[in-house]
Image (spheres, rainbow, N blue to C red):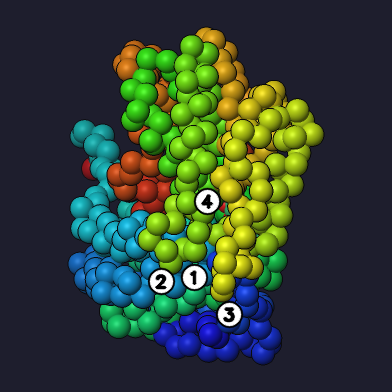
């Protein structure tokens, strides 16, 4: 299966005529090719996006909203096809893609399509001397770059607000999981989106991503991916004074107090550790357990985790699918080895799983639980981004906050307690942009989403996302 770039409403081959292999991680085999695009393809996309900007930005919010609602409905209409494509491209269980990834891509469009109908801007009244009013207008061509873990879900999380606020877009999905993004072009055409409003260029980060980042006619960049890539992008974009939204890596603490609802906590903690093979930026990878329930938790958790079915993504019983690529599997395994060198004990998992038949060469790893590590060691400080968690006991609130806040990251945290005061206290002190109390990954798309410290700059979601993609202008009127 070959996919093509989507420029000016048409599917086209890359300018250089070269292609990259696309792997099916569940089978460990190449199953298609994607364009190995370069700066020439990005230039064509920018030209198309610039030409489309006057048409798109001058439409009323109502007109743009109607087209974006049709995109949302187009995603819904093709949900089974998109879910199957996502699962095959990424290795995630088909059930997960069907229940979470694709519905959320649909909702991203519906949410921002309707949000623009309710937005307003400010006035600041100076009484008899005059007043100010604030305009927020679209800027031009937005660059959107996204990762492989939640491919269409995160791709649309950027594109939808960029388009809704009246910008045109040059977007690059991850080269590891490009297929659903390629299908989105068809859906946009069917929805009646004018040519050039959304352009999708496939290829490597160092070529396509860099060309988008460097392009002088792309004044704003929304990026989700690794912290090191975010640093590279920031280094290029900062001297050009581009607007930047960076959603980066995490090393999230899951803080479990002895007074929590144990059963509810246990069930959710299995999910928050291993959903999507632990490849969600919000997964809690460092589990801190208050000492009185440490042994009880360890025993129950390890038992549950060891029963999770690792299997083919198409199988309904599968809880853990394939990791996204062989290099990623090897990276995760290198951290398991490091954990052992650092003195950790593997309580369950740690080894690959070989399935039968057509899936025998897929990238499967048993979910892994490790204990006995210092909170300061590399395993507990660096992002692994796979099905690996560590267990650490704690005695006091102060101690657990110190351990939780000890990494350079600050994306998400989970707190389990029945003591409301404690939840507020710890929630306000844990250095995370997103804190869940007695739950995980409960999402309201209106809320600010993003990280502190090396987990990012800026917030997505709600009006924050719409405002990121606009330029604010204050007009002062003297009476
Ligand atoms: P990555 O940084 O390798 O790649 C992300 C995207 O950036 C890809 O499209 C890639 O091609 C592109 N890219 C790579 N080098 C580039 C460059 N020099 N210039 C411009 N673009 C470039 O990340 P990944 O491995 O795809 O994704 C995993 C990472 O994403 C993890 O660190 C994870 O925590 C993070 N993530 C964060 C969030 C969040 O919301 N904070 C969400 C999902 C994933």
Q: Which residue is mark 4?
A: 277
Of the image marks 4 and 1, the number of the one nearer the N terminus: 1
Circle 2 Cα neighbour tier, 10 Å, few/some/many (<14 / 14–19 / ≥20): many
**SS for dot 3:** strand
Of the image marks 3 and 2, the number of the one nearer the N terminus: 3
Q: Which residue is mark 3?
A: 31
Q: Residue 88 shows which numbered tag? A: 1
**SS for dot 2:** helix
Circle 3 Cα neighbour tier, 10 Å, few/some/many (<14 / 14–19 / ≥20): some
Q: CA distance from mark 3 to mark 1?
A: 10 Å
Q: CA distance from mark 2 to mark 4?
A: 17 Å
Question: Of residues 79 and 105, which is closer to you in this image?
Answer: 79
Of the image marks 3 and 1, the number of the one nearer the N terminus: 3
Please report contact status of discs 3 and 2: CB closer than 8 Å, yes or no. no
Q: Is residue 250 above or below residue 286?
A: below
Question: Of residues 262 and 239, which is closer to you in this image?
Answer: 262
Residue 120 x, y percent position in the rendering: 24, 50
Q: Residue 171 shows which numbered tag? A: none
Q: Quadrant of ligand 1?
A: bottom right
Circle 4 Cα neighbour tier, 10 Å, few/some/many (<14 / 14–19 / ≥20): many
Residue 373 x, y percent position in the rendering: 69, 26
Q: Residue at x 70, y 48 (%)?
A: 333
Q: CA distance from mark 1 to mark 2?
A: 6 Å
Q: Residue 84 shows which numbered tag? A: 2
Residue 102 x, y percent position in the rendering: 36, 63
Please report contact status of discs 1 and 2: CB closer than 8 Å, yes or no. yes
């Amino acid at each position: 299966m070959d996919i093509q770039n989507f420029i000016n409403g048409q599917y086209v081959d890359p300018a250089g005529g070269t292609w990259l292999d696309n792997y099916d991680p569940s089978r460990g085999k190449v199953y298609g090719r994607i364009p190995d695009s370069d700066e020439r393809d990005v230039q064509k996309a920018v030209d198309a996006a610039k030409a489309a900007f006057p048409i798109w930005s001058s439409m009323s919010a109502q007109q743009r909203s109607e087209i974006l609602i049709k995109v949302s409905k187009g995603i819904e209409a093709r949900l089974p096809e998109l879910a199957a494509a996502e699962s095959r491209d990424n290795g995630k269980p088909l059930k997960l893609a069907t229940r979470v990834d694709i519905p959320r891509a649909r909702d991203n469009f519906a949410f921002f399509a309707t949000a623009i109908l309710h937005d307003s801007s400010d006035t600041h009244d100076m009484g008899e001397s005059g007043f100010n009013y604030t305009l927020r207008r679209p800027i031009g061509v937005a660059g959107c770059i996204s990762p492989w873990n939640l491919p269409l879900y995160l791709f649309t999380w950027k594109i939808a607000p960029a388009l809704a606020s009246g910008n045109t877009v040059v977007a690059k999905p991850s080269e590891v999981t490009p297929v659903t993004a390629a299908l989105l072009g068809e859906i946009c055409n069917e929805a009646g989106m004018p040519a050039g409003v959304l352009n999708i260029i496939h290829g490597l980060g160092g070529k396509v991503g860099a060309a988008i980042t460097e392009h002088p006619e792309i004044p704003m960049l929304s990026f989700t991916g690794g912290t090191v890539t975010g640093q590279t992008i920031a280094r290029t974009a900062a001297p050009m004074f581009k607007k930047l939204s960076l959603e980066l890596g995490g090393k999230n603490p899951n803080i479990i107090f002895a007074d929590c609802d144990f059963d509810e906590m246990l069930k959710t903690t299995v999910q928050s550790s291993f959903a999507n093979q632990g490849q969600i930026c919000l997964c809690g990878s460092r589990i801190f357990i208050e000492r009185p329930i440490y042994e009880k938790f360890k025993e129950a958790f390890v038992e549950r985790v060891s029963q999770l079915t690792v299997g083919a993504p198409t199988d309904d019983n599968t809880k853990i699918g394939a990791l996204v690529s062989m290099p990623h599997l090897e990276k995760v395994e290198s951290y398991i080895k490091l954990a052992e060198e650092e003195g950790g004990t593997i309580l369950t998992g740690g080894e690959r799983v070989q399935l039968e038949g057509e899936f025998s060469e897929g990238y499967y790893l048993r979910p892994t639980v490790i204990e006995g590590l210092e909170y300061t060691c590399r395993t507990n400080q660096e992002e692994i981004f796979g099905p690996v968690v560590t267990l650490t006991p704690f005695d006091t609130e102060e101690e657990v906050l110190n351990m939780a806040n000890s990494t350079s990251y600050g994306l998400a945290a989970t707190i389990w307690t029945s003591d409301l005061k404690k939840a507020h206290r710890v929630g306000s002190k844990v250095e995370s942009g997103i804190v869940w109390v007695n739950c995980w990954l409960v999402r309201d798309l209106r809320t600010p989403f993003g990280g502190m410290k090396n987990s990012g700059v800026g917030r997505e979601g709600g009006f924050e996302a719409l405002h990121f993609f606009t330029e604010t202008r204050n007009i002062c009127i003297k009476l």
